Amino acid sequence: MFDKAVVLELVGLVDRLAELPSAVGDDATRVDVIVAVEKLKAAAYAAQLRVIADFAASQEAANKPMGVQARQAQRGVPEQIGLARKVSPASAARQLGQAHALIDQMPDTYALLLRGEISEHVATIVTTETSHLAVEDRRLVDKKLADRLPRLSPKRAHAATRRHAIGPRSPPATDAAGVRSWLTRSSNASPARRAPMRSRPRSGW
């Protein structure tokens, strides 16, 4: 009963938003509404990510007792999510991956999104630019960015995330675990994240 009430409340919110422009009478209020709606969009996206992650986990739990192998327990989930969102299964699978990344590995960034302090766009930048990292390194970047992200433009958020995700340019000399982590980051980094190599000009002889 409560679940149905939540759905009805969300539907009612959509109807109220449709009436919003006619309820605003001056430009100062319009600016405030723009800010509020932007926060609402971010919070709604974060809530949707949580529901998507919970749906996938529920489907996996329901399939396992039926003898379905773990790697196939979520088979068909992206199709169902895509149908609900009116997007392709591939797009739904990417959003499911983002949900797991933010909720499980980058909780501080997810909390900012849920409070509407950063946009969906910035959250996507952060998850994309850290996708090559090991889980512990990703969580470290999450911690380092948490206080700064709400004040950064998408461009600056991109630069800051990339800077933290690249990490040290050379491995620590005495920490074996640090060396292994650095080597993993270096080998997993995509070509787009590596510094370009300039070709040496040919000599005339």
Image (cartoon, rainbow, N blue to C red):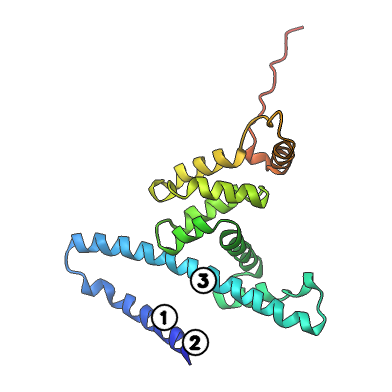
Indicate which label's residue lies in the foreground, 2 or 1: 2
The residue carrying pointer 2 sits among few (fewer than 14), some (14 to 19) or many (20 or more) residues within 10 Å by Cα, namely few
Q: Residue at label 3?
A: 48
From the viewer's side, name the closer residue of 88 and 173. 173
Q: Quadrant of residue 168?
A: top right
Residue 51 relative to residue 180: left or right: left
Evaluate whether residue 86 shows in this view.
Answer: no
Instruction: Pick whichever of labels 1 and 3 is earlier in the sequence.
Output: 1
Q: Label 3 vs label 2: CA separation? A: 15 Å
| Amino acid type for the residue under numbered disc 3 | Gln
Residue 5 horizontal/vertical position (percent)? 43, 88
Callout 1 secondary element = helix
Residue 76 relative to residue 12: left or right: right
Circle number at residue 51: none
Residue at screen point 21% across, 70% down: 24
Q: Residue at label 2?
A: 3
| Amino acid type for the residue under numbered disc 2 | Asp
Q: Quadrant of residue 171?
A: top right
